[in-house]
């Protein structure tokens, strides 16, 4: 069976050498250059070993389209987003498969606003890729090796936080960047905040020590190391540096959902705006609603995907946003998920509150959010969603992004196709794990019966 590219507004991903190769990367580069209509293009990459080959092929396509390209080298995705916001006459791309495993690589595409292409923009770009037109009578573009922008990125962030409060606390932190871009940048970044830093899984860059999705099952080294050396906090980053997971001083993971809820609640508390609003997607825990209400804010929800969250943030004037996958968006800095902003803000929070991470996490109530998947079928999902909805006739639903069932304020289920992998995702949250598992099993049984009976 031929491997297929995973194509969505989150970018294009595939197994390197199978679904994604240099020939496709060249065509993607040419199409993106044509889409950008002569604008200069920033290009960054994470540390994946297949990155060089794809980067050179993609660059050739961009140049063939007549665009100039500024090569930023190996940098975090948030740095590329920051550069485009700072220089809005540019577009950008990043060679990365984010949290996907070692055999994958991909390309993320950013428009001139510094965020991922929205659905209309991505459809326009995808049409160019599929048509694969050659540019007419254009001179080729040129390459510029751009100065590394990370110091400017960090200095801008530091100007927006209470750096002195953090430095006075003299935190000891442990960081697991999973051999990604954080291996090159996180230690110096945190040392400049006055931290003592212990890095693990930082060498060699590009050969991942574990599955790079920052989940507890993959972070055993970090969970052990933090209490072993008496550190104050642990940080796990994904390979391109946009996702962040927190580990408390006792070596317990504050999973992505609790970490995002805590950070968004803190940003609500620290803002000077009246009636602050944050935006998260429909799959993010209701803990965000609790945390924001606790500190005087409210929550708006969007479709899953960073571009959808950012679009909604700009529409409602949100002071912050994020996704339960571990990404915090701090628009005062730039409008993209950012593990470096997340690290700085949680350290500021701990410093100003003179608290331990475990104490702050204890302010949030118990919730159990189960995340499950099943293979993406070749058939449209509309009939399956209808079958699930029919099974819960009195339950309110949201159809903005797949199907979301609202059993109560504290219990919901969300079923939708993944943006980044060939799966349908099932998210179920309840007050306790048995209830969440019961509801998950109930929904999966409906899906199993529908497949068995071929009713969708």
Image (cartoon, grey):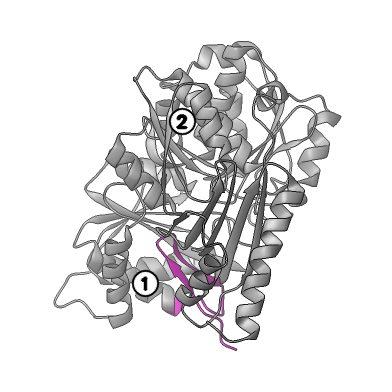
* Label number found at residue 413: none
Q: Is residue 9 magenta?
A: yes
Residue nearer the viewer, 205 or 318? 318
> Which residues are the magenta region?
1-23
Instruction: Check if mark 2's residue and mark 1's residue have beta carbons within 8 Å.
Output: no
Residue 375 vs 284, above or below: the answer is below
User: Number of marks in the image?
Assistant: 2
Which residue is tagged 1? 28
Residue 265 x/y as whole percent: 52, 27
Which residue is tagged 2? 154
Residue 453 vs 357, above or below: the answer is below
Quarter residue 331 falls in: top left
The residue sitting at the front extreme is 394
Alpha carbon distance from label 2 to label 1 = 31 Å
Question: Is 174 situated left or right of 262 in this image?
Answer: right
The residue sitting at the bottom extreme is 1
Quarter residue 431 falls in: top right
Residue 433 x/y as whole percent: 74, 47
Mark 1, Cα crowd under 10 Å, few <14 / some 14-19 / many 20+, is many
Question: Is 28 situated left or right of 173 in this image?
Answer: left
N-term-proximal mark, 2 vs 1 = 1
Q: Quadrant of the N terminus?
A: bottom right
Q: Is residue 452 magenta?
A: no
Residue 150 vs 385, above or below: the answer is above
């Amino acid at each position: 069976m031929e491997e297929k590219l995973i194509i969505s507004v989150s970018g294009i991903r595939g197994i390197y050498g199978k679904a994604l190769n240099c020939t496709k990367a060249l065509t993607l580069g040419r199409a993106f250059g044509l889409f950008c209509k002569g604008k200069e293009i920033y290009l960054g990459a994470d540390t994946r070993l297949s990155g060089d080959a794809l980067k050179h092929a993609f660059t050739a396509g961009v140049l063939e389209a007549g665009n100039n390209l500024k090569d930023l080298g190996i940098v975090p995705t948030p740095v590329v987003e920051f550069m485009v916001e700072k220089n809005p006459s540019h577009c950008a791309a990043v060679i990365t498969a984010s949290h996907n495993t070692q055999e994958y690589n991909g390309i993320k595409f950013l428009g001139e606003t510094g965020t991922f292409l929205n659905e209309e923009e991505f459809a326009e770009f995808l049409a160019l890729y599929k048509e694969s037109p050659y540019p007419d009578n254009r001179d080729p573009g040129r390459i510029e090796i751009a100065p590394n922008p990370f110091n400017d990125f960090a200095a801008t962030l530091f100007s927006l936080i209470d750096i002195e409060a953090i430095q006075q606390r003299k935190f000891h932190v442990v960081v697991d960047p999973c051999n990604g871009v954080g291996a090159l940048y996180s230690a110096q970044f945190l040392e400049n905040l006055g931290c003592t830093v212990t890095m693990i899984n930082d060498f060699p860059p590009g050969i991942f020590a574990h599955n790079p999705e920052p989940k507890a099952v993959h972070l055993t080294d970090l969970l052990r190391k933090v209490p072993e050396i008496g550190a104050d906090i642990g940080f796990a980053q994904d390979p391109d540096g946009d996702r962040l997971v927190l580990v408390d001083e006792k070596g317990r993971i504050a999973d992505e959902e609790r970490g995002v809820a805590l950070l968004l609640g803190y940003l609500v508390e620290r803002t000077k705006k009246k009636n602050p609003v944050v935006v998260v997607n429909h799959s993010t825990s209701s803990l965000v609603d609790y945390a924001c209400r606790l500190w005087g804010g409210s929550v708006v929800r969007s479709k899953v995907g960073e571009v959808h969250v950012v679009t909604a943030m700009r529409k409602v004037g949100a002071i912050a946003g994020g996704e339960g996958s571990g990404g915090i968006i701090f628009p005062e800095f730039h409008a993209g998920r950012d593990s470096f902003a997340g690290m700085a803000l949680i350290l500021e929070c701990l410093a100003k509150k003179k608290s331990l991470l475990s104490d702050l996490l204890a302010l949030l109530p118990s919730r159990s959010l189960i995340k499950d998947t099943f293979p993406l079928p070749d058939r449209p999902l509309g009939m399956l969603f209808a079958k699930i909805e029919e099974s819960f006739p009195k339950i309110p639903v949201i159809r903005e992004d797949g199907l979301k069932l609202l059993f109560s304020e504290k219990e919901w289920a969300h079923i939708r196709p993944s943006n980044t992998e060939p799966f349908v995702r099932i998210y179920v949250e309840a007050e306790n794990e048995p209830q969440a598992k019961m509801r998950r099993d109930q929904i999966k049984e409906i899906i199993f019966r529908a497949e068995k009976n071929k009713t969708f």
